[in-house]
Amino acid sequence: KPGDPPPYSRGGDTRGWYFPALFQTAGAWLLITESGTGANYCACHLAPDSSGGLYRIAFPFEDEGTRRVKYVHGVEPRHPLPWVLPWRVIVLGDTAGDILTSTLVTDLAEPSKIADTSWIKPGRASWSWWAYPDRRNETDLYSSYITYAAKQGWEYSLLDAGWEKADTKALVEQATRDKVGLMVWAHADVFYDEHRRKRRLDEIARLGIRGVKIDFWSTDRQEALAAMEATLRDAAERKLLVNFHGCTLPRGWQRTWPNFVTAEAVLGAESYMFDERYPDKSAELATILPFTRNVVGPMDFTPLGLGEKRYPRKNTAAHELATSLIFTSGIVHYADKPETYEAFPTAAKDILKAAPALWDETRCLIGEPGKVVALARRAGATWFIAGINGTAADRPLELDLSPFGNKSWKLVKEGADTVQNLDEQIVPANTSKWTHTLPARGGFVLRQDS
């Protein structure tokens, strides 16, 4: 209903609602968001007052930003004439699944400004920071993650904050030998000034790095969006991929600048380290994100973190595995350490090796935002089906697997210890009535046999 808070709102101190906003009406679903915002405008949100079902656009807040950046202008947008304004977008669908598969936000953005995109490759990445946040400059640790990425057939490995103190030259040489592209971390404050931005990107490119994760934008101000657009342009000139973190929602950028491979703009796996509310709401949130945040652009959720953090996870291990296929990102950064994944049963390890970052086809089999979602995704000739339960109660479901071909399936589901363990079993070919009970906060993944 108009004015209902989302399941993860802070309640009384709400100052507004960020895009995208998903609504269910009597006969349809609709998603409200923006597209085509860059240097031309600020990123907007919905004001908190929705009296009578009327929502209003609002500009950023005066207290947004980081102390490391001196903002010159106020929060209201400004631009010389002619002034091309961003799109205000309403996506309509008969079902929530229609919203999930919509490409309208991307379609409305400007066409690619990069003539040759052959160097831009999606992929999977190993990443040490989530498992070892205090080991930020250890060459041996970074090296072990590069080795694991190569073993998995993953395309990238991310060196997060502190990487400059490691032996970068040796790591680049190893990654080159192992055919793993390196991504590195940087703070956003450098990227507002043209001279400093280009100098930093030149330094990164000369090292043989493939891309940069730029963190702590922390605002919707027009100045930040202008700096982000300029960064995408300057990075493209140096054939560098870009991952924005601590940032605003993507607004069709992946079409205009295909070197933009992903962005955070989500309460992802890092929240287990910082937010005590997260474990209780993360399963429900995970069944909403495919119909909201991930519709508008790639989402760096950093899935499959199973290790214990400050605020312990309540979702099952199978739920976390399934999110790595349900959520999409130009680069999928797997959060946990290699030892965790090496302990998986064979079918689960095979999924981590085989599931790509780029899918050829997606079908929404079950779409109930806030409750349950099941998606079928195809890579080449192979289908994967992943489902998650966002509730605290068991959820029976039934799927017809026969439309996906005459092949048997490997099922990965909860093990004896549902929070930590996985189990596997075979599902016969041509199963027209596959029944399965998703436990509370549970999940599953089906993968077709080759």
Image: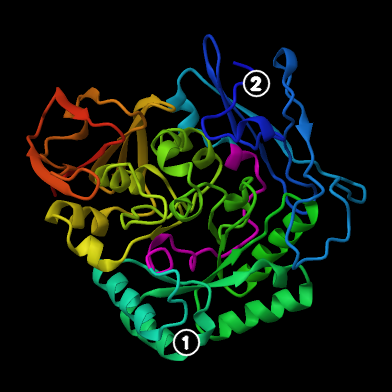
Q: Residues within 10 Å of mark 1 (few under 14, many from 20)?
A: some
Front-lying residue, 389 or 333: 389
Task: Determine whether the residue tagged by mark 2 lies in a helix, strand or loop.
Answer: loop
| Colour scheme in use | rainbow
Q: Which residue is at a point 52% across and 10% down the rendered structure image?
A: 27
Tell me, for residue 3, which label it has, or none: 2
In magenta, the rendered stretch is 105-131
Residue 153 visible at all: no
Q: Position of residue 19 (x, y in %)?
A: 63, 37
| Contact flag, marks 1 and 2 (Cβ < 8 Å) | no
Residue 444 located within the stretch drawn in magenta:
no
Q: Position of residue 110 (x, y in %)?
A: 67, 47
Q: Which residue is at a point 77% across and 47% down the rendered structure image?
A: 42
Image height check: is 227 above or below 391?
below
Q: Quadrant of residue 121?
A: bottom left
Q: Which residue is at a point 7% across and 35% down the rendered structure image?
A: 428
Front-lying residue, 100 or 223: 223
Q: Which residue is mark 1?
A: 168
- Considering every residue shown, the one lying at the far right of the view is 81
- 267 to the left or right of 328: right
Q: Which residue is at a point 12% across and 45% down the rendered structure image?
A: 424
Q: Amino acid at mark 1?
A: Thr
Q: Residues within 10 Å of mark 2 (few under 14, many from 20)?
A: some
Tell me, for residue 359, which label it has, or none: none
Task: Determine whether the residue tagged by mark 1 lies in a helix, strand or loop.
Answer: helix
- 206 to the left or right of 353: right
Disc nearest the viewer among 1 and 2: 2
Q: Position of residue 40 (x, y in %)?
A: 80, 50
